[in-house]
Amino acid sequence: MKVGFIGLGAMGAPMAASLERAGHAVQSFDLNGKGNRNSAREASAGAEVLFTSLPGPAEVDAIAKEVSAPIWFDLSTNSPKRIRALHAKFKGQLLDAPVSGGPKGAQSGKLAIWVGGDRATYDKYLSILKAIGDQPFYVGTIGAGTVAKLAHNAASFTVQASLAEIFTLGVKAGVEPLALFQALRQGATGRKRTFDRLPEHFLNGKYDPADFTVRLAHKDVTLAMELAAEVGVPMRVGKIALDELSEAMQRGWSERDCRVAMTLQEERAGVSVKVPDETLRDALED
């Protein structure tokens, strides 16, 4: 297949190379001088499908003025609002398909590709998406892939901020860093990937009977915050967690599962994340 590829940075270059290894004829361009075409217009000319991997919304908007292709997958991390506007302009030819896995994943082909747009188009081009990454996934209508990417990255950097607090607390309280790391990996949280725990309570909306009560969680985080105060470690993320558990206690939820505190955010956001039992069960069995 004749493929246009624009953006040959740390992510784009190895993804374009993967397409070439899969036997596709890649017409590529980048402002840094890499690529076998002299402009974005040349890279997209005659292409059966176009891929862009660019730094952000402004760069995608600029490229949109130059390119033409029957189908366009934007692999960039973009804005849902901007993606939907471009989708309207290109009359449905555009799908958002941001990726996750970093440069190493782009080189090895171990990438998630979160796609939003027309489902039939996704199905038609699934094989070429698999040439780029091993985990393409149709998220929903246009913009849904981008929402998933932004949610994922926000989660990643929020966890990162929390871990910075936890490790500075542990080390300043006298534990050697590597010993702390090894110990935490053995615990309930360390043994399971973060998102794997969500179906147990939050996604199914079941908080009784409790695996670990709000009362016990509140006690433990209170003790951790007291320790932080003793050794002089600021815990801004920890304070938010304690505030949530405190409100859950005030609601009379002390003996419910500690994850019930997550429903406070559902109330504030005005949305429910609950998934029907049968739907959730089927998804987990896939």
Image (spheres, rainbow, N blue to C red):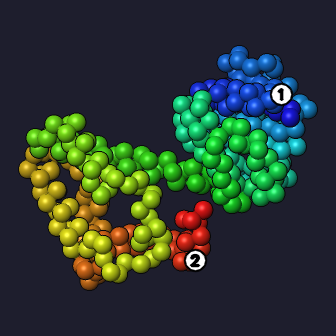
Which label sits on residue 25? 1
Which-is-in-front pick, marks 1 and 2?
Answer: 2
Q: Residue 197 sits in which quadrant?
A: bottom left
Amino acid type, residue under disc 1 in the picture: Ala
Residue occupying image coordinates x 82% and y 57%? 120
Residue 253's x, y, as percent?
28, 80
In this view, the residue in front, 21 or 214, is 21
Say which residue label 2 marks: 278
Q: CA distance from mark 1 to mark 2?
A: 44 Å
Residue 248's x, y, as percent?
29, 75
- Quadrant showing the C terminus: bottom right
Q: Residue furthest bottom?
A: 252
Q: Is residue 85 left or right of residue 224?
A: right
Residue occupying image coordinates x 80% and y 29%? 23
Residue occupying image coordinates x 76% and y 44%? 127
Q: Is residue 189 left or right of residue 96?
A: left
Residue 61's x, y, as percent?
72, 39
Determine the secondary structure under disc 1: strand
Residue 274's x, y, as percent?
51, 74
Answer yes or no: is residue 212 visible: yes
The local crowd at label 1, few if under 14, some if 14 to 19, many if 20 or more residues have their Cα within 10 Å, is some
Q: Residue furthest top?
A: 33
Determine the secondary structure under disc 2: helix
Amino acid type, residue under disc 2 in the picture: Glu
In this view, the residue in front, 186 or 156, is 186
